Image: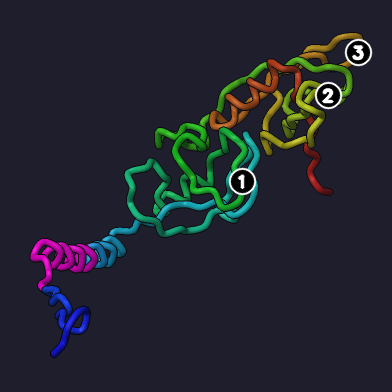
Amino acid sequence: MLTGVASRELPQWSRQRSPGLAALAVLLVLGGALASMMLVMRADERMSVIRVTGRVGAGQPFGSGSLQEARIADDGATYWPWSQRDQVAATVATVTVLPGTLLTRAMVMGGDGKAVAGKTVRVGLAFKPGQAPYDLRQGERVQLIHVPGRRNGFGGAVVVAEEAMVDGVSYTSGSAGQATVIVDSVVAPVVAAHAVSGEIAIAVIHATP
């Protein structure tokens, strides 16, 4: 006869699975499948935008050589579409744009889409000693160069207008002290901003003989 511990039967535990847990597992599987399907569908909704491949300083033209196509998901941001690359190439940057940046409207002068090159305006400049040739003359073709001052850390000089026309010059002590130049309307705001700070130099363009 079995007595004591030997006579006791081990308890039998039920291995029934909870219906709630089973339903949750099914929902998780279905949710994962739906998410994967949405990712595949969104892959076809990517848009082509403009990416900058090289550093473009504020006031500098982008040029077609610094623009590259990038494919991204359409998140509603105001990126410049790749189809408008020719328009962007003819404009200038409002801020310094670093390589790899996706170009937004705010980074382009006249980023409302109305920026077009070819319209000209007259801008007045005042020169400090050494910022302009002493014999600057009306009618000369010139470059306008941003030369940062002491407060900006004496950074490198940057051309802000590849070509402008001198419309008038006034002289102080035999040297050019002020000038009115004709520039493209796209770069005029940048030129004017640097001129107010006294950080614009002018260089005469001479034709190659």
Question: Quadrant location of the N terminus?
Answer: bottom left
Q: Nearer the viewer, mark 3 or mark 2?
A: 2
**Residue at the right extreme, as displayed:** 173
What is the distance, in whole Å, between disc 3 and disc 2 at their CAs?
14 Å
Quarter where residue 70 is shown: bottom left
Q: Identify the secondary structure beneath mark 1.
A: loop
For the point 75% across and 23% down, the residue is 199
In which quarter of the view is residue 72 placed?
A: bottom left
x 31%, y 64%: residue: 43
Residue 169: numbered disc: none
Tag 3–tag 2 contact (CB < 8 Å): no
Q: Amino acid at mark 1?
A: Leu
Q: Secondary structure at mark 2?
A: loop
Q: Is residue 85 left or right of residue 24?
A: right
Residue under circle 2?
131
Label 1 sits on residue: 98
Quickly name the residue at label 3: 174
- The correct choice, above or below, for 156 with respect to 172 in the image is below
Q: Position of residue 133 (x, y in %)?
A: 86, 26
| Vertical relation: 107 (above or below) 68 | above
Magenta range: 15-34
| Relative horizontal placement of residue 49, taking residue 8 as reference (left or right) | right
Which structural element holds mark 3? loop
Q: Nearer the viewer, residue 59 or 40?
A: 40
Q: State the separation of the CA atoms marked 1 and 3.
A: 43 Å
Q: Report x, y in % for residue 15.
A: 13, 75
Q: Earlier in the sequence, mark 1 or mark 3?
A: 1
11 left or right of 52? left
Q: Is residue 126 visible?
A: yes
Place of residue 171 in the rendered image (x, y in percent of width and height, measured from the top left): 83, 12
Q: Is residue 167 visible?
A: no
Few, some or many residues within 10 Å of mark 3 (<14, 14–19, 20+): few
